[in-house]
Image: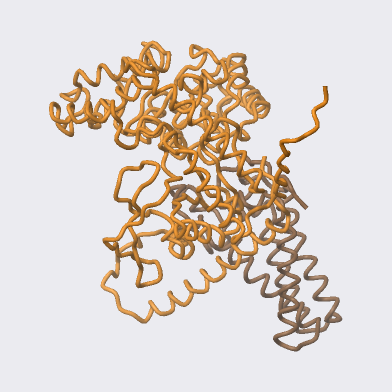
Amino acid sequence: MYVRALPTTDVNRNTEWFTYPGVWTTYILILFFSWLLVLSVFHCSPGIAWTIVHLAHFTVTYHSFHWKKGTPFGDDQGIYNRLTWWEQIDNGKQLTRNRKFLTVVPVVLYLIASHTTDYQHPMLFLNTLAVFVMVVAKFPHMHKVRIFGINGDQ
Amino acid sequence: MITIPYLTAVSTYFSYGLLFAFGQLRDFFRRFIDWWLTTNLHGYAPICLGHEDFYIRRLYHRIQDCFERPISSAPDAWFDVVERYSNDNNKTFKRTTKTSRCLNLGSYNYLGFGSFDEYCTPRVIESLKKFSASTCSSRVDAGTTSVHAELEECVTRFVGKPAAVVFGMGYATNSAIIPVLIGKGGLIISDSLNHSSIVNGARGSGATIRVFQHNTPSHLERVLREQIAEGQPRTHRPWKKIIVVVEGIYSMEGEICHLPEVVAICKKYKAYVYLDEAHSIGAIGKTGKGICELLGVDTADVDVMMGTFTKSFGSCGGYIAGSKELVQYLKHQCPAHLYATSIPTPSAQQIISAIKVILGEDGSNRGAQKLARIRENSNFFRAELQKMGFEVLGDNDSPVMPIMLYNPAKIPAFSRECLRQKVAVVVVGFPATPLLLARARICISASHSREDLIRALKVISKVGDLSGIKYFPAEPKKIEQTKNDIKLD
């Protein structure tokens, strides 16, 4: 029922919240409840609902993890202004538990979405494109890489 | 070590997620609407880069009435809070002329010097008449009076070091001294929860900064060994200097630093110790001399002792105490000494008088009484809060006690409801604290009487029930024993 929160050594307040207990559970619960919400609002089949959740998850997480740079407050005087959230977590260390978890979640969502739509065509193409972009963006080799200068600094 | 109920953690993340999502939605529509409106600022760079003001605009402004409340009396145990109202949903406030008399649980008025004192205030007024309100000069030019010299001598006697230098502002003491003490090629190892003045000073110095887990001497040792073995980044040359920065009482946790272990480790690896006693000087220790007295650490082992006069002495400014060579070096190099205006003479006189009261040199034992009272008050309040089932952080004897709130909605709920019941508390949230760990921070003062504390406990208990922050089970009240118990011989 109770869980202990050890203080972390991460000074970046923008990413330090991800090291406390309960984040992974909250993330998974939000995905599950949004699936239920989509099902109840759109009255569609479960497969289409999972596809919608997967694509919405792709849009939201791509925008907040890999597009937005910097921190939402000004106390750190802009030292992280060139780094996206994904590049900031765990102080830039690659292949930590948090990063592995965040890479696995879109893949699992993709598998669920493709399975429940029976791998049929327009959904499969969109889902595959989304998961491809998501997973490539999280590769360790893509740390601080800006392809063709997209999202680069002025 | 903070113990959170799991459900509370999950719901707190969810609440923040919802708040951020709504903030992004409103920003999206605002950008759309602003595109249509004309502006005459074409060609100018935006004031805020990216979304660095997102938190302030979309989260902080919603509950802005819980912060920055103006007061219109001295910060005594009871004070007047000015009532204000807002017509545009907390974006701007208008003050009214009405005030409400509230119990003050937020001021750092540890020894009660924040209001009229029978020894200090007449002397301060005399010094104001003689020296006037400001020295209008920096220390090197014309800003050193006999009171300043007496103050530095008083501080050395109080803290127990050979020499001291005093500055006009506590925050500036840290942020201007650390760059003078260490530069590029040096290493600063600071506790992960150090105050932002230390963080600013460390960043401004140009030295490499490493952080160790809060109040964990074993992790400090590990970081020290790793860094000494690796040397400077890229060149791997040995470090020019290593300074370990810790605080006496951490203001957001109320915890007391494990100073003896830290000093032992630093002696072993030949690193310097910088101790920031902002909250602990004058408030803990048998005669109020701070954490070194409380934990039995010899002051000669701590290389740089820094403190502020804003908390226990009821004045302004900060000091650095150290060896004679260190203080002489600082007086020649530190910009806060050379260029900043010196501490106003009446404030300096207030500090001298407060030190004299604490040490008993004014001829009474009021100092000892104040110290005993603050210790009793803190221990009583903390024990009662814990019995009621609140999660209270901090060690025994520490006058700072944060009550954990966690959920972002409970921050304004607690603050506003307490104000309605005439108790003024300070609530702190992200980014001053970690995202999950929002809290209400209570500072006990020696000028609180037992009735004040009992009244505060009643109010906090009721508000705690309303906002659901009693995360631990309350201890059952002991059944009072009747007077005709059978005596066993």
Q: How many marks?
A: 0
Residue A7 lies, in percent from the top left, at 64, 41
Residue A22 lies, in percent from the top left, at 72, 55
Q: Is residue B59 above or below residue B344?
A: below
Position of B67 with respect to B93 (left or right) is right
Residue A53 lies, in percent from the top left, at 72, 75
Residue A67 lies, in percent from the top left, at 56, 63
Q: Is residue B225 above or below residue B115?
A: above
Which quadrant would residue B307 be assigned to in this image? top left
Identity of the residue drawn at 30% across and 67% down: B43
Q: Is residue A30 visible?
A: yes
Q: Is residue B188 visible?
A: no
Position of B169 with respect to B228 (left or right) is left
- Residue lying furthest front: B484
Image quarter where the C terminus of chain B lies is top right
Q: Name the colour assigned to chain B in the rendering.
A: orange
Chain shown brown: that is: A
Which of the two residues, A47 or B425, is positioned nearer the viewer here? Answer: B425
Identity of the residue drawn at 15% across and 24% down: B142
Position of B70 with respect to B432 (left or right) is left
Image quarter where the N terminus of chain B lies is top right
Q: How is the image coloured?
A: by chain
- Residue lying furthest bottom: A43
Identity of the residue drawn at 30% across and 47% down: B73
